[in-house]
Amino acid sequence: MSSEIDDFKNSDDFCIFVVSDGTGKTAYLAVQAALAQFDLPRVKILRFDHVKNKEEIYSILDMASPQKDMVIYTLVNDEFVQALITESLQRRIIILDLLSPIVNSIKKLSTRSPRGEPGLLHNSDGESLAITE
């Protein structure tokens, strides 16, 4: 995969598209934390939350520049994930899935299956739910 990434245009002027079928807050905060490690004042974060269908995903990808911009996502709908992966490969857009590696690891340890429902981390007021220790 590194040879594929080497083909991408290096620049300090690009967009990171945050895509979620929930609030997008988790991915947005992770992107902000990562960007804090760089001096990149021209990088734009564009947040697209509550994605409802594949057509929205295609429209978002239409805005991204091939071999330049990046899509970071927290999608739990498998159909949306597959559409994003397929389209981004064809369009040569870098994508990063933040949730699936964690969900899949928890799935290996647990007797339960993931719900696959967006927005479960936040209540209807947009506040994070309390996590018990």
Image (cartoon, rainbow, N blue to C red):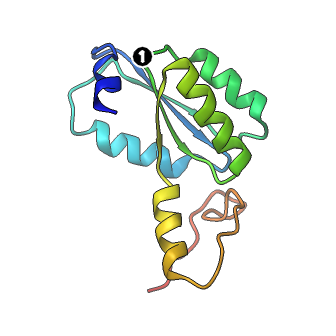
Locate the C terminus and report the quarter of the image it occupies: bottom left
User: Which residue is found at the position 63% from the left and 62% from the top?
Assistant: 122
Q: Is residue 95 left or right of residue 55?
A: left
- Residue 74 picture location, percent across and down: 56, 48
Mark 1 Cα within 10 Å, few/some/many (few <14, many 20+)? some
Q: Secondary structure at mark 1?
A: loop
Q: Is residue 99 left or right of residue 41?
A: right
- Residue 94 picture location, percent across and down: 44, 29
Identify residue for label 1: 67
- Residue 93 picture location, percent across and down: 49, 23
User: Which residue is found at the position 62% from the left and 48% from the top?
Assistant: 75
Name the quadrant containing residue 37.
Answer: top left
- Compared with residue 59, is residue 117 higher up or lower down, i.e. above or below? below
Q: Is residue 116 left or right of residue 121?
A: right
Locate the N terminus and report the quarter of the image it occupies: top left
**Front-most of residues 6 and 68:** 6
- Compared with residue 17, is residue 131 higher up or lower down, i.e. above or below? below
- Residue 81 picture location, percent across and down: 64, 43
Q: How many numbered marks have been drawn onto this rendered protein structure?
A: 1
**Front-most of residues 111 and 129:** 111
**What amino acid is labelled 1 in the image?**
Gln
- Compared with residue 16, is residue 115 higher up or lower down, i.e. above or below? below
User: Which residue is found at the position 62% from the left and 32% from the top?
Assistant: 86
